[in-house]
Amino acid sequence: MPGYWAKSLDEIPLVPEEEAGDPRWYPLQHHFGFTAFGANVYVARDSGDDLIADHDESESEQEELYLVVAGSARFTLAGEEVVAPAFTVVAVTDPGVTRKAVAAEPETTVIVIGGARTAAFESSWQPEHFVPVPTVE
């Protein structure tokens, strides 16, 4: 085992569809065996297809980050609609926020990264790198 891999997304086995209209689901966390965070890629076949099912993470206490890398998605976050074209980052820091995403275009692709909320993330970066960088309020 080399401890690293470089694979095309097409080389990642898909989770079988349960229903027509389900997105193609590439289970990165499962395939690579990540233990520090969850990671998946979802690709919608058609406009109007669900990408992210309506849910919250109250039970798991996960924070989630969604990165739209192709197409456009309509997110519903705590009842508010947000249109997210490619290269939009949607950050859900409150596990109790309900969220859902629907493809606004065929082949809309979203990378999802999540992890359990902790007291503080221990970064290997030096704190001085971030001094001039603002955070959201």
Image (cartoon, rainbow, N blue to C red):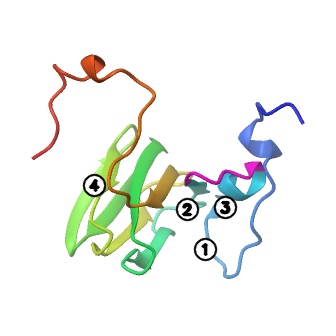
First in sequence, mark 1 or 4: give its number. 1
Q: Is residue 7 toward the left or the right of residue 48 in the image?
A: right
First in sequence, mark 3 or 4: give its number. 3
CA separation, marks 1 and 4?
A: 20 Å
- Tell me the residue at 77%/71% (across/down): 16
Residue in the foreground of this view, choosing between 2 and 103: 2
Q: Is mark 3 on a helix, strand or loop?
A: strand
First in sequence, mark 2 or 1: give its number. 1
Residue in the foreground of this view, choosing between 120 and 44: 120
Residue identifier under label 2? 46
- Tell me the residue at 25%/23% (across/down): 130
Residue 5 lies, in percent from the top left, at 78, 33
First in sequence, mark 3 or 2: give its number. 3
Which label number is shown at residue 21?
Answer: 1
Magenta residues span: 32-37
Q: Which amino acid does label 3 sit on?
A: Arg
Residue 5 vertical position relative to residue 29 in the rendered view, above or below: above
Q: What element carries label 2?
A: loop
Whether residues under marks 2 and 1 lie with C-beta atoms below 8 angstroms apart, the answer is yes
Q: Which amino acid does label 2 sit on?
A: Asp
Which label number is shown at residue 83?
Answer: 4
- Tell me the residue at 24%/58% (across/down): 82
CA separation, marks 2 and 1?
A: 8 Å
Q: Between tags 4 and 2, which lies in front? A: 4
- Tell me the residue at 32%/55% (across/down): 119
